[in-house]
Image (tube, rainbow, N blue to C red):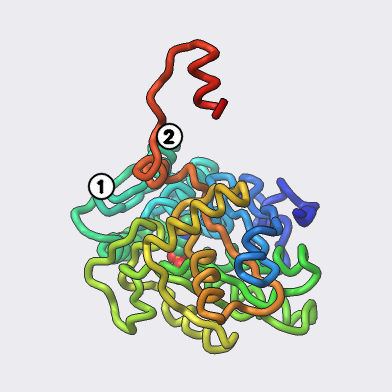
């Protein structure tokens, strides 16, 4: 079952205006983002022993949740008279910034670690005509440089999730989850990289409760990749490594927000291995028909791990699938390949069909 959505195409600014910072109508740069489907995952529910729903954030305009925050950040930058934006990115922020900058008529610079961007994301940035600056360094260095550029150049806005407008836009996903279910879930599982998204969801659930729209808030279950788990280790990771490139981050910019969400919700931040992440990605694709990129499967991998250890959350759990599987074709192609062609005869084809 999928929970019906009524506002698809409206965009998060017009849909949630009263909950967001002020944006003059003429500055709104939107692409109909948000109002993504929340689908029940029956086979996964059976494996976990809880009622599991998937929030399909890969169905946003540039195929990741980053669009929710980018529409707000870019519109506010335009309203403030900025003519260019800059961001550091592992890929999806860059793809989203490139699209929304094009929409807003702004110049877009993206600073990325050389050779580390998934194919689909690089293609998006190129298609939208953004300027790519590849650096010989990791994401954390890219963010430092982008911050400095935005500080020193007055016409340039920083659109990373350290920009509070990004968090404001992203919190709208929590509102949608509450509306679709009719109440907040008992648990929300999601991948954690820079920790902007877990910060944003917690802000959203908290505002929803304060407004008297719900009695409670979910436990926040954040999962990092084992090779890039600074919040689990308790210190920065010098050279983070994981197949899940979207969460390959050694020094999370929003670490305080993540720790607060976990503390206040009685939640947790743990790590999952690359093997567990890829297994969860496969399982979602083959048993639920949902194709997400590796990082997006970390929340599901985490729930499966908790279930194996007898710690599965009770009640309803929502897994945020942050980005679409087509973002990172190599993640699949390195594991499965196309079979050799066969002659075009019925016998040869029938053999392949198991006759
Ligand atoms: C950005 C991103 C994340 C991590 O979100 P943070 O806010 O950095 O914690 C996870 N998955 C995907 C697909 C992303 O693009």
Residue 295 image position (x, y, % from top left): 44, 59
Visible in this render: residue 164? no
The secondary structure type at the circle numbered 2 is helix
Instruction: Tell me the quarter of the image containing the N terminus.
Output: bottom right
Mark 2 neighbour density, 10 Å: few (under 14) some (14–19) many (20 or more) = few
Left/right of residue 184 with respect to residue 232 in the rendered view: right
State which mark lies toward you, 1 or 2. Answer: 1
Side of 311 where 163 appears, left or right: left
Residue lying at the far top of the rendered structure: 345
Residue 83's x, y, as percent?
A: 44, 49
Instruction: Identify the disc placed on residue 115.
Output: 1
Percent x, y of residue 138 = 25, 60
Residue at image mark 2: 127
- What's the distance in space between the residues labelled 1 and 2, CA to CA? 18 Å
- Give 149 or 268, whichever is nearer the viewer: 268
Tell me if residue 224 comes above or below residue 84 in the rendering: below
* Residue 324 to residue 337: above or below: below
* Along the viewing direction, whichever of 196 and 332 lies nearer the viewer: 332
Q: Which of the two discs, 1 and 2, labels the residue nearer the N terminus?
A: 1
- Residue occupying the point 31% across, 70% down: 250
């Amino acid at each position: 079952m999928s929970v019906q959505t009524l506002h698809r195409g409206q965009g998060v600014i017009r849909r949630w205006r009263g909950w967001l910072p002020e944006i003059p109508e003429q500055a709104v740069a939107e692409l109909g983002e948000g109002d993504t489907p929340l689908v029940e995952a029956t086979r996964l529910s059976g494996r976990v022993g809880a009622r599991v729903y998937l929030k399909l954030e890969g169905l946003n305009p540039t195929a990741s949740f980053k669009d929710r925050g980018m529409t707000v950040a870019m519109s506010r930058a335009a309203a403030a008279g900025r003519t260019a934006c800059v961001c550091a990115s592992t890929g999806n922020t860059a793809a989203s910034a490139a699209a929304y900058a094009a929409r807003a008529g702004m110049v877009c610079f993206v600073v990325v670690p050389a050779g580390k961007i998934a194919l689909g994301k690089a293609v998006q940035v190129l298609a939208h005509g953004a300027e790519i600056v590849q650096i010989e360094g990791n994401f954390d260095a890219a963010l430092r440089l982008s911050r400095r550029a935005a500080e020193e150049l007055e016409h340039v806005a920083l659109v990373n999730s350290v920009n509070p407008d990004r968090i404001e836009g992203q919190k709208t996903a929590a509102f949608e989850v509450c509306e679709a279910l009719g109440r907040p879930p008992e648990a929300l599982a999601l991948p954690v990289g820079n920790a902007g998204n877990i910060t944003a969801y917690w802000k959203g659930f908290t505002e929803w409760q304060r407004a008297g729209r719900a009695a409670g808030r979910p436990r926040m279950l954040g999962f990092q990749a084992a090779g890039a788990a600074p919040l689990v280790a308790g210190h920065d990771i010098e050279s983070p490594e994981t197949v899940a490139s979207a969460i390959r981050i050694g020094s999370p910019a929003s670490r305080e927000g993540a720790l607060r969400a976990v503390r206040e919700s009685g939640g947790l931040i743990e790590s999952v291995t690359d093997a567990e992440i890829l297994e969860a990605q496969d399982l979602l694709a083959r048993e639920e028909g949902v194709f997400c990129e590796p990082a997006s499967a970390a929340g599901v991998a985490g729930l499966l791990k908790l279930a194996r250890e007898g710690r599965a959350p009770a009640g309803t759990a929502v897994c945020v699938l942050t980005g679409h599987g087509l973002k990172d074709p190599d993640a699949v192609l390195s594991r499965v390949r196309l079979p050799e062609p066969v002659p075009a005869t019925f016998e040869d084809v029938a053999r392949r069909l198991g006759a």
